[in-house]
Image (cartoon, helix red, strand yellow):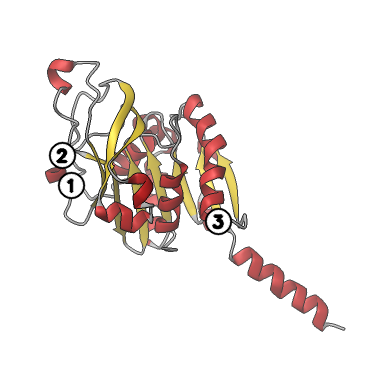
Amino acid sequence: MLLLPLLLLLLLNLATATTTRVSLYLGSGTSDNDNDAFLANLPIALSQAFPHGDYTITTFLEDEFSNDLLTKTDLLIFPGGSGNGQATALGDDNLALILSWVNAGGSYIGTCGGSFLGMSHIGFYGTPTPTLQEPWDRGSGNVSVEVLDVGFEELALDRDIFAGNITIMYYQGPIVKPQDLPSDVNMLAMFRTEIATNHPEETMGEMINTPAITSKEVGKGRVVLNSPHPELQPVVPEIYAGEILWVLKLV
């Protein structure tokens, strides 16, 4: 009679082991508008990545971040807002903890402010950190982005749908010249148009042909950083679905 309870426990453990646990930061330094977009559209991307619903989403604030949270997390996501604000809220010790966790096999996706956080504060792309184009507050709007061959391969995107330029919302995400990135950083997609509404005398011409989406293997873990916002209108959940599967080493 003991076999049935043991079998049920085994099945429960197997189910738990195959559930992807996503932790989404919504604390200081994030944007209410982008937080709402992530809460609405992240489940769509996860459902595309995991059609059987094998995922959970946990949201957390800066004072809820801990090593214990990371032990219960497979994928850490930091949304838009201010990279400086997020870094200040978390503090240096927690930033170092995130880097160690990814090096040990964790997965990180950062968008706009979360991309600034990963590149300039956590140091996923090495130290000294890559030089970013200034001023950062160049404006916002839809931009044309081209997915490169390596992007199609890593993100398993449908070439029939995403060939040529696609439209994604840009809202002052990090701009970095290709030559300023380490050689082990993959450029998955490139900006083909630009935003230079603010400070045009300084920002005009800086953005075109720079990477919009990048990735890197960091130790045993993986990182994807998005300069634009696939979660804002026009929403492109397929990009996040591909990023999720890649950072989790499922493609």
- Residue picked out by circle 3: 50
Three-letter code, disc 1: Leu
Give the Cα distance between marks 2 and 1.
Answer: 7 Å
Q: Quadrant of residue 95?
A: top left
Among the two numbered marks 3 and 1 on one chain, the one whose residue lies closer to the N terminus: 3
Give the Cα distance between marks 3 and 1.
Answer: 32 Å
Of the 4 image quadrants, the one containing the C terminus is bottom left
Q: Residues within 10 Å of mark 1 (few under 14, many from 20)?
A: some
Residue drawn at the location 39% of the way across and 29% of the way down: 85
The reply to whether dot 2 and dot 1 touch (C-beta < 8 Å) is yes
Percent coordinates x, y for residue 147 in the rendering:
28, 46
Q: Secondary structure at mark 2?
A: loop
Residue 65 visible in rendering: no
The reply to whether dot 3 and dot 1 touch (C-beta < 8 Å) is no
Three-letter code, disc 2: Lys
- Tell which of 75 and 240 is nearer to you: 240
- Give the farthest residue toward the right: 1
Disc on res. 236: none
Give the Cα distance between marks 2 and 3.
Answer: 34 Å
Disc on res. 177: 2
- Tell which of 197 and 146 is nearer to you: 146
Q: Secondary structure at mark 3?
A: loop
- Residue picked out by circle 1: 181
Three-letter code, disc 3: Phe
Percent coordinates x, y for residue 150 in the rendering:
26, 55
Residue drawn at the location 50% of the way across and 37% of the way down: 62
Seen in the picture, residue 105 relative to 93 is either above or below; the reply is below
Q: Quadrant of residue 36?
A: top right
